[in-house]
Amino acid sequence: MADPYQDAARYKARFGKKNPYDAGILAVEVFFRNDTDKPIRLDLEAIRLLLNPPGFDKQRLGPMSAEDVADRILNKGAQDPTARRRPLPVPGRGPKGGRGKDWEELVATLRAGAFATDLLPPRSTVHGFLFFDIDRRFDWVPSARLYLPDLKFMTDKKALLYFEVDFGAARPR
């Protein structure tokens, strides 16, 4: 399941005063359930938000790291939309400090809710947020799909399937 957050009130309730909405970033709460007896591996770097807004070119956006989201929220440097984004964070890794207490607290808050595991344990459900820079075009969300390729059983690396979650029925709450 994927639940795209589309209005300011939901963002403020979940993330507080400094939140991704104000920076034009879509937060998508995702839930993955593994009903099998084998662990499943996701390729987090292959996940894409597919946008097909009427009258515009199709776009494939990769998820943002908590650090990139915090930079945008706090306006710490311009973001080049063509630049390769940092991969999703692995807890305990990544660039350290130098950006201030506010930035570090915001990153910690974002990481706490972010989807950051590439393993779906057997008979379990995992969830968290994925973040995508949609440049404040929340009106494009109904034309979006979340694409999750390269799911594999971890034990034999046998390709399993892929998922696309259509946001066409999503409405702001």
Image (cartoon, rainbow, N blue to C red):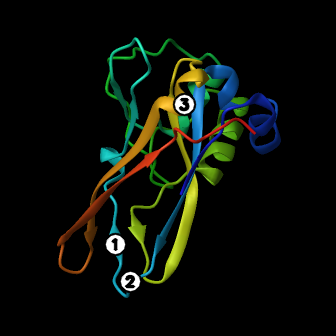
Name the mark nearer the viewer: 1 or 2: 2
Q: Position of residue 90 (x, y in %)?
A: 45, 53
The Cα atoms of the two marked residues, 1 and 2, are separated by 9 Å
Name the quadrant of the C terminus: top right
Q: Amino acid at mark 3?
A: Val
Q: How many marks?
A: 3
The Cα atoms of the two marked residues, 1 and 3, are separated by 28 Å
Residue 157 lies, with reference to residue 118, above or below; the image says below
Secondary-structure class at tag 1: strand
Q: Residue at x 69, y 37 (%)?
A: 106
Q: Earlier in the sequence, mark 3 or mark 2?
A: 2
Residue 99 lies, with reference to residue 169, above or below; the image says above
Q: Position of residue 139 (x, y in %)?
A: 59, 22
Q: Residue furthest bottom?
A: 37
Question: Marks 2 and 1: in contact by CB < 8 Å?
Answer: yes
Q: Which mark is residue 172?
A: none
165, 150: nearer the viewer:
165
Report crowding for label 3: few under 14, some 14 to 19, many 20 or more residues within 10 A (C-alpha): many
Q: Which residue is mark 1?
A: 40
Name the mark nearer the viewer: 3 or 2: 3
Q: Amino acid at mark 1?
A: Ile
Q: Which residue is mark 3?
A: 141
Q: Amino acid at mark 2?
A: Thr
Can the viewer see residue 5?
yes
Report crowding for label 1: few under 14, some 14 to 19, many 20 or more residues within 10 A (C-alpha): many
Q: Residue at x 23, y 80 (%)?
A: 155
66, 172: nearer the viewer:
172
Q: Which residue is mark 2?
A: 36
Residue 73 lies, with reference to residue 101, above or below; the image says above
Residue 75 lies, with reference to residue 147, above or below; the image says above
